[in-house]
Amino acid sequence: MICLGIESTAHTFGAGIVTNKGEVLSNQRSMYTTASGGIHPMKATKHHLLLCDKIINSALEEAKLKLSDLDLIAFSQGPGLGQTLRVGAVSARTLSKLLNVPLLGVNHCVAHIEIGKHKTKLKDPITLYVSGANTQIIAYAGNKYRVFGETLDIGVGKFLDTIGRFMGTGFPGGPAIENLAAKGKKYIELPYSIKGMDFSFAGIQTKVRQLIESEAYSNNDLAFSTQETVFAMLTEATERAIAHIGKNEVLLTGGVAANKRLTRMLETMCKSRKVKFEVCPRELSGDQGAMIAWQGIVEYSAGKRQKISDTEINGKWRTDQVEVNWIK
Ligand code: ATP
Ligand code: FE2
């Protein structure tokens, strides 16, 4: 079985083609970026509308396949921005009708976890899912992916993007902050905001903004201190989850999983607890279509079917609301 997966929850329009063995035949994407300022939903939607057919065609070309070779179409049904989600949903419905193949809407967050499990061979991990819009500690328990800890306000990626904007780096700010932080030396004390296994970033964001505006510190030192503080919070919450849930594997995924400092902190903590730690391969940890295609295959193989009328997008679809039919 060959599945085309379409991703359009936010800044990225992606099309990936995956086989039922989990082999990624292609993974094409285009990300809406800006030189300064944050992501604008209308502009991201326009970007997706202009590029969607081109990206899908490139995915077919890369996989050396024709449209008629596709057996299943999967798309991100949520969570995300309503306007951008609709571009993917409409493309997917059109292709499914045109080719007369089944259509499945899948949950974007769960897709991040399943592709990570598949590629790292972890069986039942605690997942630290760190992206722009989402920051959650997730584990499977009682037929659902339960959220054991999460951000009480913004996602850590969005937080880094906003700090980047204050520093004038453009979008996305996460990689830029990582580069600045590598040149930072001095630790400037920042609020440390963790409540049980939950955490919040808004207060730290305000504090860093004040410090940037005070011009008393270099951006390098502020980026360094920001990373040290928020990544320590995430590591501490993950460690607490390990102690509480009692699983012996940790998976790191989402766009922020590309960050080397965060990876190192988690690695050190897991080693000391004798817990296996894996990071989702970088090309599959950010937003892209291959994870959506794989999720489509996983759910279709387990028997999930959807009518077109069930494929309305859900911008607020939470990880713990997903009916998990594929884990026995
Ligand atoms: P989701 O819809 O799952 O919330 P997303 O739309 O935010 O995902 P992703 O590609 O998963 O998309 O993550 C993008 C985020 O990852 C951005 O906020 C970006 O700044 C951040 N990011 C990317 N690379 C790095 C890095 N090296 N260090 C820190 N953050 C990074
Ligand atoms: Fe994502």
Image: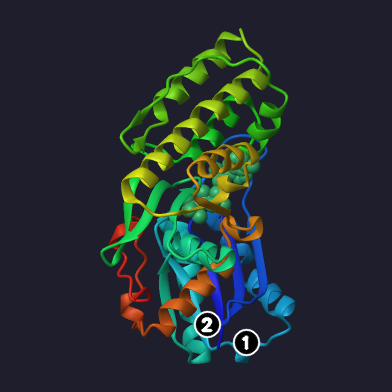
Residue type for callout 2: Leu
Q: Is residue 323 visible to the viewer in this orientation of the structure?
A: yes
Image location (x, y in percent) of residue 39: 54, 43
Residue drawn 55% across and 83% down?
20
Q: Residues within 10 Å of mark 2 (few under 14, many from 20)?
A: some
Of the numbered discs 2 and 1, the one sitting upstream in the chain is 1
183 in relation to 93, above or below: above
Q: Is residue 43 visible to the viewer in this orientation of the structure?
A: no
Residue drawn 37% across and 66% down?
313
Q: Nearer the viewer, residue 275 or 168?
A: 275
Secondary structure type for disc 1: helix
Q: Nearer the viewer, residue 109 or 118?
A: 118
Residue drawn 53% across and 56% down?
45
63 in relation to 75, above or below: below
Counting every numbered tag in the picture gives 2
Image location (x, y in percent) of residue 142: 25, 64
Q: Nearer the viewer, residue 155 or 78?
A: 155
The circle on residue 95 is 2
Residue type for callout 1: Leu
Q: Residues within 10 Å of mark 1 (few under 14, many from 20)?
A: some
109 in relation to 64, above or below: above
Real-space Cα separation, disc 2 to disc 1, in angstroms:
9 Å
The circle on residue 67 is 1
Q: Is the Cβ of the residue at disc 2 closer than 8 Å to that at disc 1?
A: yes
